[in-house]
Amino acid sequence: MTVKKIYPYMQGRSFNPFESQIRLVTAKLAQCEQDSFVQNVINQIFNMELKQIEAERLLPSNIVHLQLDELEHDFGQLREEYQQLITESKGLLEDFSSVNAALSKLKLEQHHLKKDFELISQQQADLIEAFKAIKQARERISQVQERINQELEEIGQMQQQIGQEQERIEENQKRIRRDQKFFRKEVANLNQSFKEMKAHVDILIEKFIPTQTDENLTDEELAEKAAINRELITQNFMVKLQEEIEQEYQEKEALDLLNVSQVNGQQAYSSAIREESPENPAAVLNENEQEIPLPTLPSQQGWANPFKTFADLFKQGYNSLKHTAKKTNDFACKSSFLIAMASASFFVIFAGMV
């Protein structure tokens, strides 16, 4: 019996950690088989020799008269040798059975090892897939970091633009305060001009109305008529003009207050954002990089929208300040135009009365 016939399952194995031990056991088994085969041959030869000796002894022509004691002694030695050989053969059989039991255990262990190797190969495939997933996740994280860096650069640029807008708004606020002081002075001058014009109108009316004579009216009626005409002129021109100018001034002042409140709210919002935002967002991101799980890639609108909205608010405030300045200039031009028109109207009326 050869090794291939005893262990057919060992053929075609590429990896076996117990290959050296199995080879040693296989060699021992082969040696035991050879010893058993030799012992069987010896036993057969010995039995054949015994049978031949017994047959030759029984032949009449081969009867040898030997001493009985010598024959008994030789026969006893042969028997002892035979018993010894039988004992050794039994030991060899027991060893062979124990080796077969050990081989069956080794076969079972090989089966378990085969299952373990299959499980290890499956785990290796799972690990390869996991490494691929980790590599893809790292690529996604690098892309997210690039996007975050770009958005941080955009945020820095927006902060610079916001600082410039704040400087412009502060300059516009100073200009509004100067304009308010100027318009207060203008309103005071207009009121003083109205008073002077009223006094001048009264003088002109008193100068031109008494020259009109009516034979049917008395002096008291003429004075009353002049008073009525003066009151009508004042109500129709000066009072109406003053009300329009005051209304324009109130609208401008309300618009200025609204713009100032919007600018103050925007400045408070800007200061709150600067206090909440870290001094170095990139450093914070680098510190927390290991704690970030696999992200769903954030959209690019999440970082820039608050600052864009804030910049839009500043632009609206700046545009409203421009509108206020334009309104102020229109108010000054309109006031001058109204004063000129009133003066021209008065002179035309007085010329017609004359």
Image (cartoon, helix red, strand yellow):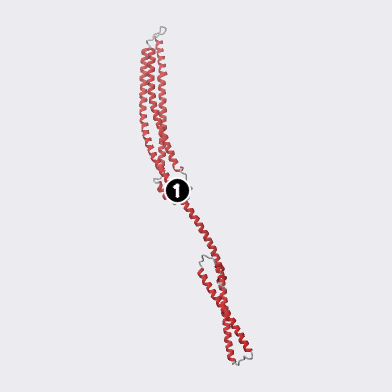
Give the left or right position of residue 308, taking residue 80 as reference: left
- In-front residue for pair 295/82: 82
Residue 305 in the image: state x and y as whole percent: 45, 41
- In-front residue for pair 35/120: 35
Q: Quadrant of residue 186?
A: top left
Residue 261 in the image: state x and y as whole percent: 41, 34
- Quadrant position of the C terminus in the picture: top left
Q: Quadrant of residue 91?
A: bottom right
The residue at 41%/26% (across/down) is 248
Residue 91 in view of the camera: no
- Quadrant position of the N terminus in the picture: bottom right
**In terms of secondary structure, where does tag 1 sit?**
helix
- In-front residue for pair 171/5: 5
Q: Which residue is mark 1?
A: 143
274, above or below 63, in the image: above
- In-front residue for pair 313/124: 124
70, above or below 125, in the image: below
Give the left or right position of residue 1, taking residue 339 as reference: right
61, above or below 133, in the image: below
Amino acid type, callout 1: Gln
Residue 81 in view of the camera: yes
Residue 341 in the image: state x and y as whole percent: 39, 20
331, above or below 117, in the image: above
Farthest residue in the front direction?
61
Question: How many numbered markers are drawn?
Answer: 1
Give neighbour class at mark 1: few <14, some 14-19, many 20+ (Cα, 10 Å): few
Residue 97 in the image: state x and y as whole percent: 57, 74
